[in-house]
Image (cartoon, rainbow, N blue to C red):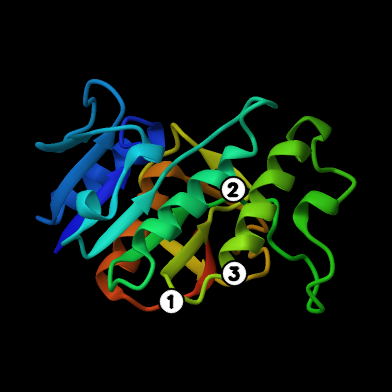
């Protein structure tokens, strides 16, 4: 199985590359500069410069793009639109490293994590930008996308336990009442979804067991 990981130099991207390679998948890193991931194959291009020819032949493309500053938050939407347009009408899956702020906290799906009183004010613009991008992604019926939200506490340096709980649109807590997952366990869930092909045009979520 051939996969491309966009923004493979990021913390999430590097761990997804490693997890996929540990399972003997054929992995290509897509990076703007020097490749810092474990992938031996590289496409050295800016995300916005990627073409259909660049991504042709991949079974899955992982979008690990992230933007954090106020002036770049809109790129959550523009980068995703570019990737969707590039993959439109193909059999190549698009798997997106998403956010937790847009997960619902009620059965009616009218309230989200980011609406809560305890949600940090400083992260609200990021959550809003990622929620907007997800909403736009939901309109794409021409792309085989899957959006994977992490738990609320997404730990870059957290341990790899090898276990997680698969959730859906609503915030899921583990047996300890926690919403937490490490980047390493998230990478396991991502690669499992790539291999399993189970949730086309769906948003799913993961939390540490």
Eye-nearest disc, 3 or 1: 3
Q: Residue at x 68, y 45 (%)?
A: 129
Q: Which of marks 3 and 1 is nearer the N terminus?
A: 3
Quadrant for the N terminus in the image: bottom left
Q: How many marks?
A: 3
Q: Residue at x 55, y 45 (%)?
A: 78
Separation of residues labelled 2 and 1 (CA atoms): 21 Å
Q: Are marks 3 and 1 in contact (CB under 8 Å)?
A: no
Q: Residue 186, how many percent across, how many down?
A: 42, 52
Q: Is mark 1 on a helix, strand or loop?
A: loop
Q: What element carries label 2?
A: helix
Residue under label 2: 77
Q: Residues within 10 Å of mark 2 (few under 14, many from 20)?
A: some
Q: Earlier in the sequence, mark 2 or mark 3?
A: 2
Q: Earlier in the sequence, mark 2 or mark 1?
A: 2
Residue under label 1: 199
Q: Is residue 79 above or below residue 132?
A: above
Q: Is residue 83 above or below residue 74?
A: below
Separation of residues labelled 2 and 3 (CA atoms): 12 Å
* Residue 202 appears in the picture as rendered: yes
Q: Is residue 103 above or below residue 69?
A: below
Return the residue found at the far top: 34
Eye-nearest disc, 2 or 1: 2
Residue 138's disc is 3
Q: Residue 168, how many percent across, how many down?
A: 58, 72
Q: Residue 55, how many percent across, how many down?
A: 24, 54
Q: Residue at x 30, y 71 (%)?
A: 90
Q: Residue 149, how many percent across, how many down?
A: 55, 57
Who is closer to the viewer here, 200 or 139? 139
Residue 185's disc is none
Q: In this view, does 198 lie above or below 79?
A: below
């Amino acid at each position: 199985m051939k996969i491309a990981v966009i923004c493979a130099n990021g913390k999430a991207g590097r761990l997804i590359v490693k997890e996929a390679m540990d399972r003997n998948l054929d992995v290509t890193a897509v990076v703007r500069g020097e490749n810092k991931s474990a992938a031996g194959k590289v496409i050295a291009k800016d995300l916005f410069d990627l073409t259909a020819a660049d991504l042709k032949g991949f079974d899955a493309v992982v979008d690990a793009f992230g933007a954090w500053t106020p002036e770049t938050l809109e790129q959550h939407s523009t980068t995703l639109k570019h990737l969707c347009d590039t993959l439109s009408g193909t059999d190549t899956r698009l798997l997106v490293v998403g956010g937790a702020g847009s997960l619902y906290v009620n059965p009616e799906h009218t309230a989200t994590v980011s609406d809560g009183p305890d949600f940090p004010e400083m992260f609200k613009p990021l959550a809003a930008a990622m929620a907007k991008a997800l909403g736009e992604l939901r309109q794409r019926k021409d792309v085989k996308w899957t959006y994977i939200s992490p738990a609320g506490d997404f730990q870059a340096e957290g341990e790899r336990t090898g276990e997680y709980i698969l959730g859906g649109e609503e915030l899921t807590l583990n047996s300890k009442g926690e919403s937490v997952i490490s980047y390493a366990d998230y990478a396991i869930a991502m690669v499992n979804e790539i291999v399993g092909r189970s949730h086309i045009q769906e948003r799913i979520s993961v939390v540490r067991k």
